[in-house]
């Protein structure tokens, strides 16, 4: 069985890479990610979709490196199609197996966003509106594709930035459209605003903790 993984970064895709997995990195572009997922499904053999990678915390109790298993928070607009009963049952079993593999993980809603949620005000507002544990830029797209093709779906994320951490400007320009690292843009932002260096160092440290946790979690994942 092939597992299709939706992620944002090529670094995440490398973590998930193995023989029975196809990882698609969207680079923060919803249309690009959806197209990549649809192309993978069209090639055949996909039996389930996982939204995997790092995420930003909305719940103040979460810290960098925490593992979160999510159910997508669906808004009325732009939400995936309502699944039939057979899909819902298969979906529930897939999520249940994922939760069993990570007994120490937090389980709850994750909300998808087409843009990076970077400020304290925007994180707080999203948390108050949804009650979601975390936010990422891929889960809502992956859930849409999964529902469209009646494929079971789960979310496996590790926390990169805490709810009380403001992402510096350099972190917001650090991703290329293909999901790679835009080092030139990061350095240019830092040159324009050197005062953001401490926040950027913290962001990098927290992201490294999230990536290590993701690698550890993925080694125990079974389809």
Image (spheres, rainbow, N blue to C red):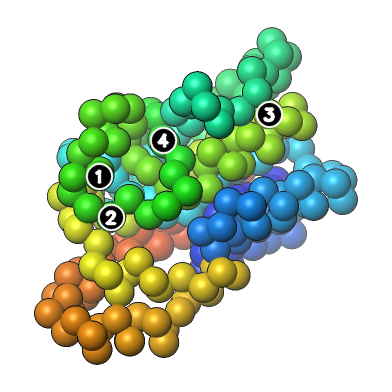
In this view, the mark in front (2 or 4): 2
Identify the mark nearer the N-term, 1 or 3.
1
Closer mark to the observer between disc 1 and disc 3: 1
**What residue is drawn where x is 42% and y is 36%?**
111
Task: Describe residue 8's horizontal placement relative to residue 54 as left or right.
Answer: right
Report the side of 209 relative to 81 (left or right). left
**Badge 3 or badge 2: first in the primary sequence:** 2
Calculate the distance from the C-alpha at mark 3 to the C-alpha at mark 2: 29 Å
Q: Is residue 194 left or right of residue 45?
A: left
Query: Which residue is situated farthest in the top direction here?
Result: 85
Q: Tell whether label 2 touches label 3 (CB within 8 Å).
A: no
Mark 4 or mark 3: which comes first in sequence?
A: 4
Q: Secondary structure at mark 3?
A: helix
Residue position marked by numbered label 1 in the rendering = 122
CB within 8 Å, label 4 to label 1: no
Structural distance between the alpha carbons of marks 1 and 2 = 7 Å
- Image quarter of the N terminus: top right
Q: How many C-alpha atoms fall within 10 Å of the one at disc 1: few (<14), some, or many (≥20)?
A: some
Q: Which residue is mark 4?
A: 110
Please tell me the numbered disc located at residue 147: 3
Q: Is residue 214 above or below residue 176?
A: above
Q: Nearer the viewer, residue 155 or 33?
A: 33
Q: Badges 4 and 3: C-beta atoms under 8 Å apart?
A: no
Q: CA distance from mark 4 to mark 3?
A: 16 Å
Q: Which residue is mark 2?
A: 118
Vertical arrangement, residue 42 with respect to residue 26, above or below: above
In the picture provided, is 161 more to the left or to the right than 176? Answer: left
Which of the pair 191/200 is nearer the observer? 191
């Amino acid at each position: 069985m092939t597992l299709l993984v939706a992620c944002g970064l090529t670094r995440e895709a490398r973590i998930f890479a193995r023989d029975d997995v196809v990882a698609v990195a969207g680079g923060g572009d919803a249309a690009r990610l959806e197209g990549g997922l649809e192309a993978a499904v069209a090639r055949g053999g996909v039996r389930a979709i996982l939204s995997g990678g790092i995420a930003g915390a909305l719940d103040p109790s979460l810290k960098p490196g925490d593992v979160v298993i999510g159910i997508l928070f669906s808004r009325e607009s732009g939400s995936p199609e309502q699944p039939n009963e057979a899909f819902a049952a298969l979906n529930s079993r897939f999520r249940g197996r994922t939760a069993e593999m990570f007994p120490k993980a937090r389980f709850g809603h994750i909300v998808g966003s087409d843009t990076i949620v970077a400020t304290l005000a925007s994180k707080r507002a999203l948390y108050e509106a949804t009650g979601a544990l975390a936010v990422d830029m891929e889960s809502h797209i992956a859930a849409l594709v999964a529902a469209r093709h009646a494929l079971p779906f789960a979310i496996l994320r590790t926390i990169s930035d805490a709810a009380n951490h403001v992402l510096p400007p350099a972190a917001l320009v650090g991703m290329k459209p293909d999901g790679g690292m835009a080092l030139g843009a990061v350095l240019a932002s830092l040159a324009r605003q050197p005062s953001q260096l401490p926040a950027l160092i913290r962001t990098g440290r927290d992201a490294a903790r999230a990536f290590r946790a993701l690698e550890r979690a993925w080694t125990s994942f079974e389809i």
